Amino acid sequence: MIAKKKALTFVLVTSVLSSAATFIAVRKVSNKKETPVELTGECSYNIKRLHGYEYIKPLEYAEPEHESALYNSFKTKIEAIVAEKKKAGLLNNASVYLRDFKKGNWMSFQGKVPFHPGSLIKVPILISYLKFEEYQPGILNAPVTFTGAEYIPSQSYNSKQIEVGKTYTIKELLDYMIKYSDNNATFLLKKNLNVAQFKKTYDNVGLPVPNIMDVNYSLSAEDFSVFLKVLYNAGYLSIENSEYAIKLLTECDFKDGFVKGLPAGTPVAHKFGEWGDGGANHELHESGIIYIDGEAYILTVMTSGKSIPELAKTIQELSGLFDQELDDPNKANGLFPKKNVVM
């Protein structure tokens, strides 16, 4: 019994001495002057959330606050092309916004310069109708008759139009508006649009609310690209409606811009916009999501000048330039490397 007590006393004393030694050792370490760790190459993130909800703020998108150095070469070449075309009188101005969906890296060349969006505004109209359908199912099946009495501005690119005297559903009009950029269909959609829902679309994604009938309304490349971000991320519409909207944009039949500058068969969900003052001032823009090897990026190009065909060539050239930058095997830029294809 005495032996057991001695053994227990020995264990307790050993435990106390061990704890004391540990405390002294830790104290000595903690008293050492620590060298601050410097973070290099770090960039804080810009987190955008949807407005208009009482208890939640759904994620709209997240991306680095600063432009990525990965796109420096592309940006430098854009500057050179724009300067050259300005000098030749082929271009008054241009802006380019680029963003990948892999890491949210982005680049902006004069991306905050405002332009008249023209038919680009048809994208938020589409989004507004699809959102209203979520609140009130059946709206897309509502019939509308085209009487032909409406005033429709002329446009350079117009492949297919609705016919006078025929009745169309809202969904069919959306098809004509996006696929063929039909201004007749767009006029009917504007006429029957829930204005409050249209304004709410802008407000929810954090953009200034426009007057849809204001001919002087302007929008920058960076701002317009927000609509493509929320569609791709399905942050505003349901997943099904986001998928439907982007699929519809892949059927846009404008071929003189991005499509002409990219390799044949490259999937592009895009929309173009055209504006003119009735004189020598013209604007042509294109914005879309371009898919390469299962990855995607936004490219928005806005241009102004004297000739629509020349502006289309500029857009084509800039999309082709990015494809070259993307597919350059000599560049270790980490941007969607091409996969090896077995023939």
Image (spheres, rainbow, N blue to C red):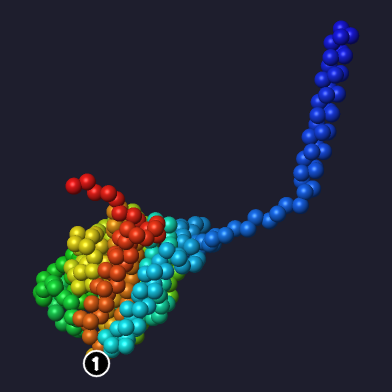
Front one among 63 and 51:
63
Residue at the image point whose x is 41% and y is 72% from the top: 108
Report if residue 207 is visible in the image.
Answer: yes
Report if residue 184 is visible in the image.
Answer: no
Which residue of the protein is positioned furthest toward the front in this rendering? 330
Residue at the image point whose x is 83% and y is 33% from the top: 20
Q: Is residue 47 above or below residue 25?
A: below
Q: Secondary structure at mark 1?
A: loop
Front one among 85 and 192:
85
Residue at the image point whose x is 29% and y is 50% from the top: 339
x, y percent for residue 225: 37, 68
Query: Dot 1, crowdedness within 10 Å: few (<14), some or many (≥20)?
Result: few
Q: Which residue is mark 1?
A: 279
Say whether residue 29 is left or right of residue 319: right
Which residue of the protein is positioned furthest toward the right in this rendering? 2
x, y percent for residue 233: 38, 57
Q: Is residue 51 above or below residue 305?
A: above
